[in-house]
Amino acid sequence: MDFKEGVIIPIDKPYGITSFKALAHVRYLCSQAVGGKVKIGHAGTLDPLATGVLILATGKKTKLIETLQAHSKEYTATLQLGATTPSYDMEHEVNETFPTEHITEEAIRNVLPQFIGDIEQIPPTYSAVKIDGKRAFDYRRKGEEVVLKPKHIHIDEIEITHFDKEKMQLSLRVNCGKGTYIRALARDLGRAVQSGAYLTALRRTRVGDVKVEECIDYSHFQEWLNSQTIEK
């Protein structure tokens, strides 16, 4: 294994840490293993509260990052209907509630087609989208309002995997292209059924041909590294 020539390292990012922190930890361990700094980047950010496939590339293979980012992705998501948070996930407390008595699984199925194919999606304001060189979430965390422009995205498929009418919880499997925000999909789906919605769980289960089952467990990365033959 030659980190300078380049290695693709898919990891299963755990809950509660940023993609950058996961990358920094792996870079530190790889650098320790070779006795020098390892160049490393990641292909597609995962939110801190999301888990799953995060593809890292080292050395010369960092040139492939743009190509890797363009690959299709699959997510499993759980939505809470009837409420929203400022970030449309559990990073923030609920700030608004909505009626849900009218929501049925059939009503949800009826609105799903409007989110399939080539669509326009406005990213969440709590996101890493840049405005004048700064991240949108930096403005929001300072209490400033931001307005983001819609982005062209593509969603191949949305499948309902479970709907709990009593708890108003909806589980989905989503196949989509680059730049899709599942938090924004939750927001828009909630509005489409005349209510609100936010994510309570999100897992990226696939990037291109790489499935989460094939990824290295982040918490056991050192053990995986110890089992490799590494060029120094």
Image (cartoon, rainbow, N blue to C red):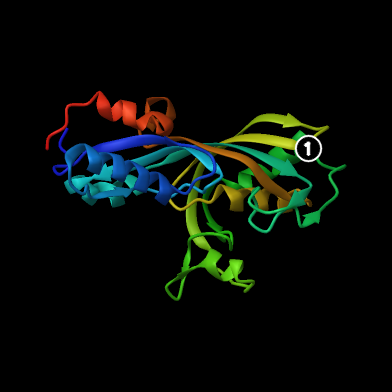
Is 148 rendered above or below residue 206? Answer: below
* Label 1, residues with CA under 10 Å away: few <14, some 14-19, many ≥20: some
- In percent of width and height, residue 171 lies at 65, 34
Residue at 49%, 45% (x, y): give it.
Answer: 17
| Residue at point 51%, 49% (across, down) | 47
At x 26% / y 38%, what residue is drawn?
Answer: 8
Along the line of sight, the residue nearer the viewer: 114 or 40: 40
- Place residue 172 in its image quadrant: top right
Q: Position of residue 41 (x, y in %)?
A: 30, 50
Closer to the camera, 47 or 230? 230
Residue 61 placement, left or right of 109 = left
Residue under circle 1? 168
User: In which quadrant is the C terminus drawn?
Assistant: top left
Work out whether residue 169 or residue 226 is closer to the camera in this orientation and state it: 226
**Looking at the image, is 195 positioned above or below residue 205?**
below
Would residue 21 be found to the left or right of residue 126 on screen? Answer: left
| Above or below: residue 217 compared with residue 86 | above
Amino acid residing under circle 1: Met
> Residue 124 appears at what percent x and percent y?
58, 59
The residue lying at 23 percent from left, 50 percent from top is 39
Quadrant of the rendered structure where residue 9 is?
A: top left
